[in-house]
Image (cartoon, rainbow, N blue to C red):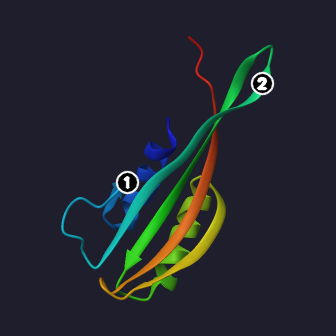
Amino acid sequence: MSLLADLNNILEPINIPVETGVFSDTPPDEYLVITPMSDRLDLFADNEAYMILSEARLSLFTKKNYMKRKKELTKALQSGGITITDRQYVGYEHDTKFHHYAIDVMKEYETEED
């Protein structure tokens, strides 16, 4: 599995459009963008990595009150085994009328053997 696949599976029942990198269509009044941030090798022994640490940022854009979605996303992510490393209100975008709220996440995966 990968972090992006896990996030998409966890977020699917929430019923909010999700895209990776940028929202490519005309945005609805509420949507999520997943931005991969890092994918590094970790936990070394005998010059081989045994873990992959993947991190991403979920950016919630909404024209509604973001507080309910923040709580819903936090609960779903934690229940899905994702570690939340940061949450922050980025700001209100006057030109688009969207609130932007970011949730940074990470998950460790064992490296796959050949």
Residue sitting farthest toward the right = 45
Q: Position of residue 112 (x, y in %)?
A: 58, 21
Identify which amino acid the numbered label 1 is placed on: Gly
Q: Residue at x 62, y 60 (%)?
A: 78
Q: Residue at x 37, y 58 (%)?
A: 12
- Determine if residue 82 is in view: no
Specify the label residue 21 is tagged with.
Answer: 1
Identify which amino acid the numbered label 2 is placed on: Phe
- Specify the quadrant of the image occupied by residue 26: bottom left
* Closer to the camera in the image, 53 or 80: 53
- Separation of marks 2 and 1 at Cα, in angstroms: 30 Å
Crowding near the residue tagged with mark 1, few <14, some 14–19, many ≥20 C-alpha atoms within 10 Å: some
* Closer to the camera in the image, 73 or 79: 73
Q: Which residue is mark 2?
A: 44
Q: Position of residue 27 (x, y in %)?
A: 24, 71
Crowding near the residue tagged with mark 2, few <14, some 14–19, many ≥20 C-alpha atoms within 10 Å: few
Q: Secondary structure at mark 2?
A: strand
Q: Position of residue 40 (x, y in %)?
A: 63, 36
Q: Residue at x 50, y 35 (%)?
A: 1
- Specify the quadrant of the image occupied by residue 49: top right
Q: Is residue 24 above or below residue 65?
A: above
Residue sitting farthest toward the top = 114
- Relative placement, left or right, of 110 versus 91 is right
- Relative placement, left or right, of 32 versus 2 is left
Q: Secondary structure at mark 1?
A: loop
Q: Position of residue 31 (x, y in %)?
A: 34, 70
